[in-house]
Image (cartoon, rainbow, N blue to C red):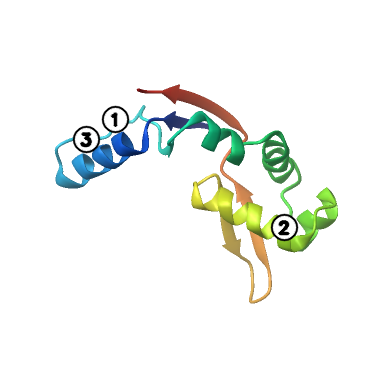
Amino acid sequence: MTVIKIGIMPQEKIRQRTIAIAKGEYKQKRTDPKIWFPSMKALSEVLSDKNRELLKIIVEQQPESIKVLSEITGRKPNNLSRTLNTLSNYGLVEMRPRDKRKIQPIAKGSDFLIQTSS
């Protein structure tokens, strides 16, 4: 499984970095984190023990839908869907449509390398 590189940097610096990249003033390195959080607190909320366990289950069991993942984890589908959307917004999970009624969650990884910057 791919190790996901995560960076922690104040929100203002994340914004400045994003603008510099858009203007062509800064070119991202291959080794730079692709996912950024404004604080350790924000990171710990998204990558809580419960959510890391969920990512591990998705990697290992490869459920074909949110419903199947709900059955595996015992979590309610609505709650699970909200969590998966949050993880998807951060690029940690891909929500792949399988047909009109099924969406398959695919974890991008379950191992993380965290880099901090002040």
Q: Which residue is mark 3?
A: 27
Residue 70 image point, x, y percent = 79, 56
Question: Which numbered disc, 3 or 2, marks the residue that appears first in the sequence?
Answer: 3
- Name the residue nearer the viewer: 33 or 9: 9
Q: Residue at (84%, 56%) from the top-left corner?
A: 71
Please give the name of the residue rendered at 42% of the width and 23% of the height, measured from the top-left corner: 116
Amino acid residing under circle 1: Lys
In the rendering, at what x and y percent does residue 42 appear?
53, 37
Q: Nearer the viewer, mark 3 or mark 2?
A: 2
Q: Nearer the viewer, residue 76 or 106?
A: 76
Residue type marked 2: Asn
Which is in the foreground here, disc 2 or disc 1?
2
Which is more N-terminal, label 1 or label 2? 1
The secondary structure type at the circle numbered 3 is: loop
Reply above or below: 99 against 43.
below
Q: Position of residue 30 (x, y in %)?
A: 33, 31
Q: Residues within 10 Å of mark 3 (few under 14, many from 20)?
A: few
State yes or no: discs 3 and 1 in contact (Cβ < 8 Å). Answer: yes
As helix, strand or loop, the secondary structure at mark 1 comes to loop
The CA span between labels 3 and 1 is 6 Å
Q: Residue at x 57, y 48 (%)?
A: 87
Task: State left or right for residue 69 relative to residue 98.
Answer: right
- In the visual, does 99 lie left or right of 14? right
Q: Which residue is painted at 21% across and 35% down in the image?
A: 27
Badge 2 density bin: few <14, some 14–19, many ≥20, Cα 10 Å = few
In contact (CB < 8 Å): disc 2 and disc 1: no
- The residue wearing badge 2 is 79
Q: Which residue is tagged 1?
A: 29
* Relative to 32, 111 lies left or right: right
What amino acid is found at the position of numbered circle 3 in the picture?
Lys
